[in-house]
Image (cartoon, coloured by chain):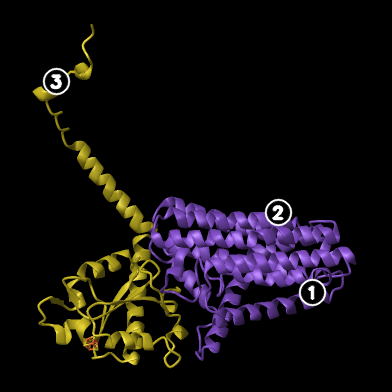
Chain colours: A purple, B yellow
Amino acid sequence: MVMIKYIAALAFIVLGPFIGAIVQGIDRKITARMQGRVGPPILQPIYDVKKLFAKEDATVNGVMDFYIILALFFAVFAGVIFFMGGNLLLAIFVLTLSTLFVIVAAYSARSPYSDLGAEREALQVMCYEPFMVLMPVAMFLVYGSFEVATTVDIAMPLIVYMPLIFISLIFILTIKLRKSPFDLSTSHHAHQELVKGMTTEMSGKTFAAFEIMEWYETVLFFGLIGMFFVSSAWWSWLVAIGAIIVCYLLEIIIDNNFARVKWQTTLKWSWAITLLLFVANIAILSFI
Amino acid sequence: MSGTSKSPWIIHYDGSSCNGCDIEVLACLTPMYDVERFGVINTGNPKHADVFLITGAVNERNIGVVKQIYSQMLEPKVVVACGACACSGGIFHDCYNVIGGVDKAIPVDVYVPGCAVRPEALIDAVVAGLGALEEKRAALELASSYEAKELAKAAEQERLAEAASQPLLEEPAKTEEQTDIDINADEEPGE
Ligand code: SF4
């Protein structure tokens, strides 16, 4: 049993970026099809990052590189904690740390665009962090443990106890995946706008590291979705994979159909929706 | 093998174009031509771009901007001059403020004729630019390769040795002013 933990962690480190890249490629393909275009090849994100690695070395300052590498490291670390079945709360804190390093990196460039991106990212952290911390608390109320591994030992999957919290999670993931309508800090589609934000001053290898970090994050978010569906039954894993696919398709549809909102709206919606659903879910749980 | 030729990111700058060429550049992104098929992304950021598409001639006001965008792009990079104006000044060539084609400001790799350029010609030009991009990348790789570094090191050592064999410059004699400076000049005289 102990071996499985290490294998899962290793699989995350090695396969994580590939899965993330291919998912991003499929995302771009589906997006293009929705707009009536053919779209880039599925492996396009990998070509992009390979290209970025071949670019000349030049950064605004050395500190920025360092922060981005730290951000990548902590994103991987958070994933390792999660996929080893470790403490969910800890994994979420480490993931936030990673995002904070990206914010500091963007600030360190001292350019108006990346400053604005950094500010918006900080606001986004404020939007989702309360919920991200409350989610493990709810899990603790149900299972009496913060360990992700508990989900595998118990017959009832989390979704049965926390359906409303799951809906909040999907809402929050739209912000975390930086998808429209919440792609305030940096956007995947709007390349010529202010919203390239945080990544404006990143170039070459630094930008490549940022992209790889996003791939790891995507896989970690898939893990978060899957966590709600796995139980002690073997077929629950298939359900989890199905749920991940459905949720991601939903994110793509949301991404393509909604215009960007202001940060005020993001803050209001995210706090109102996630906190209300959280309280409602906890109230229901306490009555059962 | 490299991703360079598979993901040419573009930055588009409108010099003093009549907007005819710009419309055609943007037409490349529409479902009709969809250059994203080839991994082309129209970034608005010189730091991310590999290909610099310029429409319109260079004039006294924008030459600085063109040069700055070019200098902010990282190697390997190529410049594509789109349309008659960008190639030579076009119908604006004898305007009082027009300097001429883009090559008056920065080195151009691909010239695309046409007034306005056709989207097909533009796609062709970017593909031609990819060849140049690949060459530049190979040159860059060579420059950062082990042999190149060794050669540079050897040259540096030779230069140092030469410098060491030269007699040292004599220390400049102190001028009168310097010797005369009184460190305590600012202090109040003691009572
Ligand atoms: S080449 Fe023709 S269409 Fe293009 S910018 Fe010049 S005048 Fe306009």
Q: Which mark is residue A237?
A: 1
Q: Which amino acid, mark 1?
A: Trp
Name the residue at 18% across, 18% down.
B182
Q: Position of residue A23 (x, y in %)?
A: 61, 76
Q: Position of residue A251 (x, y in %)?
A: 63, 77
Mark 3: secondary structure: helix
Instruction: State the quadrant of the C terminus of chain B.
Output: top left
Indicate left or right for B96 with A53 as reference.
left
Q: Few, some or many C-alpha atoms within 10 Å of disc 3 (few <14, some 14-19, many ≥20)?
A: few
Q: Which amino acid, mark 3?
A: Thr
Using the image, determine if residue B39 lies above or below residue A10.
below
Labels 1 and 2 within one chain: yes
Outermost residue to the top:
B191
Q: Few, some or many C-alpha atoms within 10 Å of disc 2 (few <14, some 14-19, many ≥20)?
A: some
Q: Position of residue B152 (x, y in %)?
A: 30, 53
Instruction: Estimate the spatial distance between the alpha carbons at disc 1 and disc 2, rounded to whole Å.
Output: 24 Å
Q: Position of residue A125 (x, y in %)?
A: 59, 60
- Residue bearing the label numbered 2: A90
Q: Which mark is residue B179?
A: 3
Instruction: State the quadrant of the N terminus of chain B.
Output: bottom left
Using the image, determine if residue A27 lies above or below residue B121.
above
